Image: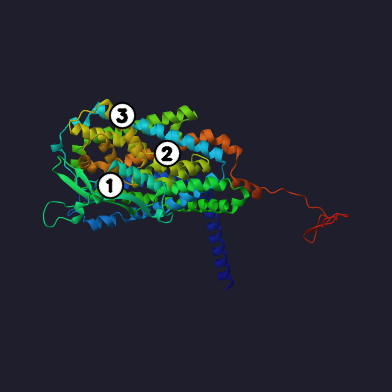
Amino acid sequence: MERVRRVRDQARKRAMESTNSCKAKCNPCCSKVWKWLKDHKENVLLVLLIIFMGFGVMIGLLVRGVTPKLDAQQIMFLGFPGDLLMRMLKMMILPLIVSSLISGLANLEMKSSGRMGGRAVLYYMSTTFLAVVLGIILVSAIKPGNRFSKEDLTESTGTPDLVVTSDKILDLVRSVFPDNLVTSSFEQVITEYGHIDCAPGPERPGICNLTHKIVKRYKDNPNDTMYYTIHVNTKSGVNILGILVFSIAFGIILGGMGDGGKPLKDFFNCLSEVSMKIVNLIIWYSPIGVCFLIAAKLVDIEDLGGVLSSLGFYMLTVLVGLAIHGLIVVPLIYFIFVRKNPFIFIYGIIQAMVTAFATSSSSATMPVTMRCLEERNKIDKRVASFVIPVGATINMDGTALYEAVAALFIAQLNNKSMTAGDIVVTSITATIASIGAAGVPSAGLITMIIVLNAVGLPDDDVAYIIAVDWFLDRFRTMINVLGDSIGAGIVNHYSVGELDSHPDEQEMEETSYQDPPEYPEKEGNVNNGFSQIPAGASDSTPM
């Protein structure tokens, strides 16, 4: 028995030594792999995004070949993981805009925030106008609308409802000044027209006789008159513009309150940090969501080959314009003002641009954009929290270029020669209309009707280009996000001196807590946890 016990103990000892030897060999290797993944987690996430985007394209093209075709419910199931990603990103828009804007502006002096805002708006208007001019030059040179006639195109269903330029401008102003801040978090103001049949007959509605209650719109001739009722209603969606303006005003005033506003400053600083941490968690789900978003969209297209062949030159014009603006114009502006390599900066926001392509929404991409700027490009948090929410709302370079190209394309389809005055009007209107384009998918279609109305072009012809809008929308959203990010880099470069002279209060507090002054402890200095009072000193005020 003793001999058996000894043999068993020796075998156990050899097994433990072997295990420890394996651990000793594996631990350095595992620790190196873990350290590499930790140090390069952003690159890993970017590679995963690109790989899963490729998977999405392959899945979409493969499923398109399945017989019988998927029905609407099956396509909805296919896109469900992507729908979850969109919902999570949109969920973070409101807390991120409010907390980041208020905390950023509250920690700046009014003069500094005013200068930063002026630089941002000047950049936005300049790049948007340059994008419009570039689009007009390209569409005038390539002339995609002269290469075929309307008969060669298929008119898509889903033409936008009646849109009047003056109504869209009024809706924009109403959005700036919401009547209820709570409802602004889930409702947007919109002017809607209800069509009524005022044809002569016994069933003619009585409202047709009340001229102050109806709106007339003429079609091809005065005898072909359409009658509408007009209402200011609301639709589902976050009124980002109204919340943006309120948050800017709130943050500036809070910053001027000094110590009295410190509790609120601390609250919004904390809310901003928590929001960004939640965004960091959502980002790791994004490769899966991106994959199924793209797959579902490819399956949902009715005739992919026919659409690409009939509108190929129009798409080429838009894509060439977006490429020139995104790879030459905007990087050149960054290089001129910052004197650094713009493509290193762009590499830092690739993750945001891939997300923009998948979601086709600059607002939904905003949490990712802010994270990339702050963590990868080292943009000051106060700059990113101000420039990006404002830019995602009013800076739409890609949308402005698209609207200019589409307007002249439709003019060429109708054989209408555009005068110099028409081109100037198109440039100005496209620049202004892009400001009112919400950062949601295909919002540019609505604002494009404003441009068409401004130069007297038929807005019904928008139906011809709806078929490819889903595709072009993704590329122009990428350019919108790129333009916002480059703007943040330029504003940060010129604001860094002012920001250094007024450091973030939260950073100051963290520094004071992390690096407390060290006092040497000597005998006699501490007595049972309480400091001794020197002889002759008193804690009472002398009489």
Name the residue type under label 2.
Answer: Asp
Q: On the image, numbered disc 1 is attached to which residue? A: 58
Name the residue type under label 3.
Answer: Val
Name the residue type under label 1.
Answer: Met
C-beta proximity under 8 Å, tags 2 and 3 = no
Query: What x and y, as percent, mark residue 360?
Result: 34, 45
Q: Secondary structure at mark 1?
A: helix
Q: Secondary structure at mark 2?
A: helix
Name the mark nearer the viewer: 2 or 1: 2
In this rendering, position of residue 148 left or right of residue 507: left
User: Which residue sits at x=32%, y=29%?
Assistant: 134
Q: On the image, numbered disc 2 is attached to which residue? A: 484
In which quarter of the view is residue 74 placed?
Answer: bottom left
User: Which residue sits at x=18%, y=47%?
Assistant: 226
Query: What x and y, as percent, mark residue 55?
Result: 31, 47
Query: What x and y, as percent, mark residue 112?
Result: 55, 38
C-beta proximity under 8 Å, tags 3 and 1 = no
Query: What x and y, as percent, mark residue 396?
Result: 37, 39
Name the mark nearer the viewer: 2 or 3: 3
Instruction: Give me the C-alpha separation between circle 2 and circle 1.
Output: 31 Å
Give the colour scheme shown: rainbow
Question: Label 3 neighbourhood size at 10 Å, few (<14), some (14-19), many (20+)?
Answer: some
In this rendering, position of residue 253 left or right of residue 130: right
Name the mark nearer the viewer: 3 or 1: 3
Q: Earlier in the sequence, mark 3 or mark 1?
A: 1
Q: On the image, numbered disc 3 is attached to which residue? A: 424
User: Which residue sits at x=35%, y=49%?
Assistant: 290
Instruction: Give me the C-alpha separation between circle 3 and circle 1.
Output: 44 Å
Image quadrant where one finds the C terminus: bottom right
